[in-house]
Every structure is written in structure tokens, then in C-alpha cells.
Amino acid sequence: MEVISAKISSIVHATEDVDRVLQSLSRVFPEGALPSKAETRRFHGHYGNEIRTVELSIRGAPARSFLDHLWKSLPSFDRATILGALGNHLDSSGGLHLRLDKEQVFRGIIRMKDQDPIKIRLSFRRRIKSNLEPEEEIKQLLESLENGL
């Protein structure tokens, strides 16, 4: 199983500063691996308030480094929760979805949380001759990272 890409996104509410959100997103990346370009979109909420989204994308070896760094940064109970309910974090194409606590990331702490999250989607390429289901391959990859801690 090979990591081929990672997309990291967050909603930026009208009360938040885009630059501050991007600065906090940089904490999720290994040193020097932050993509140079962020995609920003603007929307308007139901009451006319401005809502923006920011998205960072990486491909290839930097995506693998990102996963390694993220996994090491997560507390052991979050890693155990992900491994214990991996199917809940996978989409139909085998993409791994994780949600980080945006407020904690602002403080430099990487934690899982579903509300007002930083969203992460990791895409994988399967081994050609693997007899394993994608979920099992991803689990083995994450367990190998766990064993390397």
C-alpha cells in the first residue's frame, strides 16, 4: 500500500483569519513540507456571512512523509481509536478520512475531533498482487507506523 496524495482542508469562518488558519495547518506538516500554494474558496452563509475554505494538497513522497508525521503526532488513544474503527474512516474508494480538532491545532496540539475540524483525506495505491482488502492493507500500513514509534 502506497500513499499517493493527501488533501487537508478547513472552513474559515468570518471571525477567523485565513493567514492564522494556514499557519495552524502548517503544524500538521513535517518541517519544510508545507505546500507553497493553498486553494481558497469563498461562500456566503445562510445569513449572508462570508465563509471561506482553504485546501492544501500534496502528492507522492511528501504525502507519505505527511502521514508518518501525522501518525507520530497523534496521541496513542487517537491512534488506537482509528485502528479500532478503521472502517468508519474509509470511503468507498479506500480513502482514509481523519478530522483534527482545529482549536487544538491552533495551540500546537494534534488531536482528533469531529466538530469544526481540519479535514484530511489520504489516498492510496494498492499493491498489484495483494489478496487483502483495502481496509486490511491500510490497517497494516498504520500498524507498521505504530510499531515504528
Image: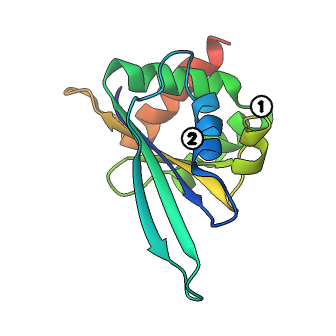
Q: CA distance from mark 2 to mark 1?
A: 22 Å
* Residue 17 image position (x, y, % from top left): 64, 52
Give the label on residue 56, or none: none
Q: How many marks?
A: 2
**Position of 88 compared to 135: left or right?**
right
Rendered position, 61 above or below 127: above
Mark 2 residue crowding within 10 angstroms, few (<14) / some (14–19) / many (20+): some
Residue at 37% in and 41% down = 134
According to the image, label 2 marks what residue? 22
Q: Which residue is mark 1?
A: 75
Farthest bottom residue in view: 47
Residue contact at pointers 2 and 1, CB within 8 angstroms? no
Viewer-proximal residue, 139 or 98?
98
Question: Quadrant location of the C terminus?
Answer: top right
Amino acid carrying label 1: it is Pro
x 28%, y 32%: residue: 126
- Mark earlier in primary sequence (2, 1): 2
